[in-house]
Structure formats: C-alpha cells, structure tokens
Image (cartoon, rainbow, N blue to C red):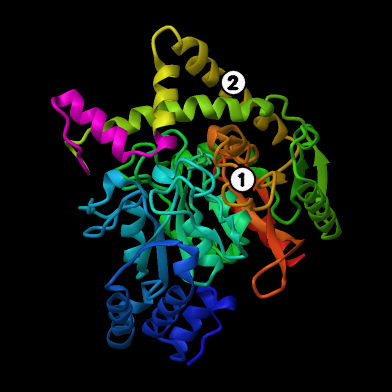
Amino acid sequence: MTIDLKTLTISKVREMFTKGTLTSTELVQAYLDQINLHDKEVNAFREVYSDALEQAKNADDIRKNDPTQASTMSLLGIPFAIKDNMQINGKHAGAASKILENYVSSYDATVIAKLKKAGAIFIGRLNMDEFAMGGSTENSAYGVVKNPNDLSRVAGGSSGGSAASVAMDAVLVSLGSDTGGSIRQPSSYCGVVGLKPTYGRVSRHGLMAMGSSLDVIGPIAKTVEEVEEIFNVISGQDRYDATTLSDEDVKGAIGKSSNINLQKLRVGIVPELMNMGGINPVVLKNLNDSIEKLKNAGVEIKEVSLPHIKYSLAVYYVLMPAEVSSNMSRFDSIKYGGKVEGKDLLGDYLNTRGELLGKEVRRRIILGTYVLSSGYHDAYYNKANIVRDLIAADFKKAYEEVDVILTPTAPSPAFKMGQNSSDPVAMYLEDIFTVTANLIGIPAISIPSGVVELDEVNSAGEKIKLPLGIQFMAPLCREDVLFAIGKKFTTA
Ligand code: GLN
C-alpha cells in the first residue's frame, strides 16, 4: 500500500489504526523505506533502532488482542524519533559526541516512560550538535544534518535531526531539547512546528544536561494540534526532577494571566527588536505579512516595549557556558563514556576531554570556567543574573497589555553549510530571538509562516524554496495560548 506521509498527522493515523486501514507495522515500514531512500544524504538519524518493526508489531498486537488496554493508550503505535541526548533504557545515547560513543542508557527518561505508557514507539535517535551546543548541527561529531528543502543548507540546530526527520517524512513526530532555541530554530529552518514548553513543565530527568536552568524537552511535528497532544502527554510534575512544577505551582505561575481570553488574543510586537539591524529583509517581510494575516483574522496587534531584551543574547552567552562548564565536568573519563589514557590522573582528564570533546564544547567549557572564576564571578555571572531579572520584569509588564508576543523565530532562513562555522559570533546571532524565552522560562512556539523562493535551482532544476517561521511567546505556563494563536494563524 502507498501511504501519503506528507499529510499524515497523529489523529489521522489513529483514525486509520482504529478503522483497520493501516497498521503500525505498515507505517513504520514506510518510514524505514523513506529513511533508506533519503537519510544517507540528509543524515538526520544517528541510529535507526533494529527493533523498530518489532515495537510496531507489539503495538498492533495490543490493538488486536486487548482492545480494553488499547483504548487507554492514546499514542498506541505512533512512531516517534528522539534527539540523541535522551535516555531510552537499553539503547545507545550519545549526544552526538565521541565521548559517549559506546554509552548505553540504563533507564528511561521521564518523557520516554510517559510516551511508552501511552503506547508510543521509537524508531530511532536523531543527529544534533554535540551536547546540544550549536545552531546548525555542524558541531555533531557525526556530520551535519542537511536541510531537506535544500541539501546545500543546514537544517538548523541543535535539534537539527529532530526537525529534518519530520520535515522529510522519515518519522511522524519527534522530540528535541531547547536551551536557547534548539527546538524552534531548526523547526523554522525546516518548515515544521516546534514547541519549547515553560521551564519545569516537562521533566528533564534522563535528558543530558546542557544549561540546567534553561533546558527543556519539547515536541516537533507538522501541526500545532500534534505538538499540543504530545505536550499534554509528556508534561507534569516528576519526583526525579525537583524543578518540575506541581499543579499548584502552575496555578501560581499563571497568576494574573489567568484572565486571558483565548477567543480574543492580543498580540504584541516589539519594534525595538525589529529595528536592531542584522535581520534578513526576507524575514522582516515575512513577519509583516504574518502580522497582516493575523490582523485580517481579527487579531488585535499592539506595540510593546522590552527595553532590556537587547541584552538577552549577551546574558545567555554568559549564563549558558557557566552551566555548561559545570555540567560537562562529569565527563571525566571515569564515570561515563570513553577514555584516552594519560600518564597520570590529570593526563587522563586532559587527553580524554581534549580528544573526545569537540571544539565548540571545549570553547564553552573554557568560557564558562572563566565567567565563574573568582574575581570575575561578580562581574559576569552575577551581573548576567541581574539583567536576567530585568528582562523578566519587562515581559511581566508587557503581558499586562498583550497576551502573547510575536517575533521571527530566526533572523535568517536556513544558511549554507560552512557559512557561519568559522565565526562563532555570527552563529550565536542566529539565537537572537529565541534565547529570551529560555532565560525567563516562558513557553514559546515556532510556526511555519511561508517560504522564500530563491533564484537558485536544485538538482532537479526547480527553484529552491526555504521555509520561514514565526515565534509566539506566552506568559509562564500558558502553552494553551500558544496553541490557540498557533491554530488561528495556521488556519487564517
Ligand atoms: N544555538 C544555541 C546555542 O548554541 C541554542 C542551543 C540549544 O538550545 N541547545 O547555545
């Protein structure tokens, strides 16, 4: 049978499963065929699990033999793929780093346990920037993920494999992680929907830490509805992650924003951010078109001021490396992963970390160690934390006037491979719109907002079309606002 993978969604698949017109085994086989056909080139997958079909068959068996149990499993037989920095018991997980090349997980991350309980199956793990540090997957130790829309360009990062795999119809849905934009930016580059939930709404247990006060796991899919459904399954308080929020915490965090009217959302735009310079004109044009589209759909658009947002990127690139340098200290050649022997203990450390960690990871360890060192701690780390609070206060104020804030997701469409890789600052600038949500913990979503047609043609002689994305940022714990505006925008 031929399956139209392009238009498949979780709810369509579920319907077909229930009607008996499709089995999970057939669906997984179709994805495996697609991977065989395209992934040699795209390089989205680090590994396709050898038991993918077996998992599908188990799901099919449950549906056939135990309808009562099947009815309690909302994602029974739905194929997921996950970023290579999440743990599935018994499977390799490597964060696309040589240092974890042979590492096998000994437990399920909480998100995985929840998805398994709902019946989801996992067909593979996805390529990424090493330890999620980067915005193009050019920092993967296993080669770059190419953009399915134009193979000369990056898919974005760090969750490049998570976005590309969905965009190329090699899996139905995926999970990524977002520390400064790693779900949203590749989603924007690849033309899919990516959600960064509120910090603490999704457990980080079983996610390899990058910046512990910034990291969050989230879903990537073709539609807002799917991302919403996955979020509802994976979110919730978790005894293994003390930073997860209880229902009580969520209520408290929502506070004043509880009176938002989902039918009449007020969208804020930020002129000072748009006038900063450095934004590709096609991105600005797309943003203006998106604003028009929202207005035509009856959405109120209002200008708001966020005076400290211009410091977000600088603050992020102080705090994030500080947390990175602490988190990476566990890779000491003893507890986990690979080892390159030295002549003594210090030699073991130096050789292992020097040879098995990539350049960007080492750069951030050095930066982070520096900003935390005595004498500089106050000047950088503490100062950055103060500005972080100022940024949060700006947003609090803005949310008195609007319900959700709109920006582009990234300042440019997907860039050419190699274009930014020798200039870390140019690469860091790609995060300009996304890092703020991580700094202050709020939820944000990237939604496809059209394409830009280039003058270049691809190998088939067709003009290359690159996707663009817009980002909505809502108050703490108001993912529902993102889903509402996302649906409104998509159907407008
Ligand atoms: N591109 C950003 C960085 O390099 C974000 C990474 C992320 O969100 N994991 O830090």
Residue 343 position within the rendered picture, expressed as x and y whole percent measured from the top left = 14, 27
339 in the magenta segment: yes
Disc 2 crowd, CA 10 A, few/some/many (<14, 14-19, 20+)? some
Q: Residue at x 49, y 48 (%)?
A: 138
Is 85 rendered above or below residue 377?
below
Q: Which residues are magenta?
A: 338-361
- What residue sits right under mark 1 in the picture? 419
Mark 1, mark 2: which one is toward the viewer? 1
**Relative depth, front residue between 38 and 329:** 38
Q: Residue at x 68, y 46 (%)?
A: 260
- What residue sits right under mark 2 in the picture? 387
Q: Residue at x 40, y 78 (%)?
A: 28
Residue 457 position within the rendered picture, expressed as x and y whole percent measured from the top left = 72, 67
Q: Quadrant of the C terminus?
A: bottom right
Question: Is residue 375 visible in the rendered structure shown here?
Answer: yes
Q: Name the secondary structure under disc 2.
A: helix
Cα distance in 3D space between marks 1 and 2: 31 Å
309 in the magenta segment: no
